[in-house]
Amino acid sequence: MKSESTQKTFLSKRLESLDALRGFDMFLIIGGTHFISSFIHAMGWESMSWLTDQFRHVPWHGLTFEDVIFPLFLFMVGVSMVYSVASSRRKGMSKKEIYWKAFKRMILLSILGIIYKNRPLHFDWDQIRYVSVLGRIGVTGFLATLILLNTTWRGRIYWLAGILILYWAAVLFIPVPGYGAGDLSQEGNLVTYIHSYIVPGRLIDGIYDENGYFTHIPAVGLVLMGTLASSLLRSSKMEMQKVAWLVGAGAVAIAIGVLWSFHFPINKHLWSSSFIMVTGGISFLFMALFYLVIDVWGYKKWAFPFKVIGLNSIFIYMASALIDFGYTSKYLLNGFIQMAGEDGQRFIIQLGVLLLEFGLLYFMYRKRIFVKV
């Protein structure tokens, strides 16, 4: 990881909608969903319970908004990857050098992921969780880089289809000892069986881990979908044509995913092929909306807080785990907290956490400090 002080031109050449969308997604990850939920509860808006329900992961089959947040980030890894590779090419880097750069990033993100998942650090090897969100970003980014550098956009569509179809066939038709083929229960599915053998250390639920190595395979599909969106954004098409294509691609992907779900249910824990298509389609729609409003219509000021977050997304993700913002929030806002009820206290604490996190990021933004991995 390295910190860089950049010139003003650094910001002007970027796809601003991508930074804002990344920041919006990271805002939700570092406490935004808890902030919204706590606000609704503090206000006593029982009629809004449907919204707070969307900020909880489904137990097994199904989909909520909470389940879309991480896939959206993987999609944006693909969007930014195309710009990054193009920049590396302009600097004269060879394919081998780009492969090595992506490989080092994969290793670094995997190490950071282990630190994030095992705080405070310990050396009970059987209880260490080796797989993580950051590890998945690193591995899928590396694999997608290999595909990106050796295919056209059509080739990436073939890879996307091939990966998801083969994953579907494996999970549905390869028999699991003691359960047979096609068992999609938590205990009897192929993913659980494979992870129990190949994933070392502690699994998130004892017998399976949704970020395990086998589910890296379908997750690559989300990054590839992001690269397709990026290739479209970098094309010579008119701006409104790009928006229309993004919306169309999103609608088609969602339709395919919904139809597929009748045979292979939408399931984030299994990273089912239908889950990849539906969440990838939703990501296309988010990208279209942010691109339309920010880069086409030019309405940028509202997105500034998200842009500040998006420019240091990995940094604040790690900082939110390693720095106790909650302790400082309680200390600084104790007087207000004491005057509030239980729901109000949670809201005030979470508000303080978000303000402290944003204050740190804004300071870094003003100093032109952007932490890259």
Image (cartoon, grey):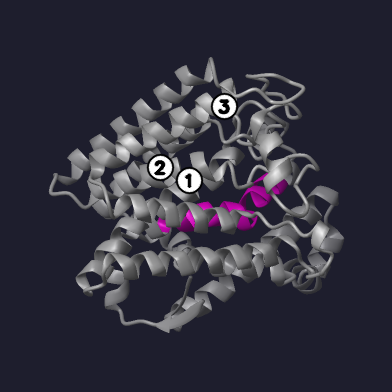
* Residue designated by label 1: 72
Left or right? Give the position of 177 relative to 297. right
Specify the label residue 286 is tagged with: 2
Please provide percent x and percent y for residue 132: 64, 55
Q: Are marks 2 and 1 in contact (CB under 8 Å)?
A: yes
For label 2, the SS is: helix
Label 2 to label 1: alpha-carbon separation: 9 Å
Dot 2 amino acid type: Phe
* Residue designated by label 3: 266
Label 3 to label 1: alpha-carbon separation: 16 Å
Q: Identify which residue, 181 or 56, lies in the foreground.
A: 181
Dot 3 amino acid type: Ile
Q: Is residue 194 visible?
A: yes
For the point 44% across and 42% down, the residue is 222
144 in relation to 366, above or below: above
37 within the magenta span: yes
> Which sits earlier in the primary sequence, circle 3 or circle 1?
1
Please provide percent x and percent y for residue 171: 58, 27
Q: Identify which residue, 214 or 23, lies in the foreground.
A: 214
Which is more foreground, mark 3 or mark 1? Answer: 3
Q: Are marks 3 and 1 in contact (CB under 8 Å)?
A: no
For label 1, the SS is: helix
Q: Which residues are magenta?
A: 20-39
Left or right? Give the position of 214 relative to 49. left
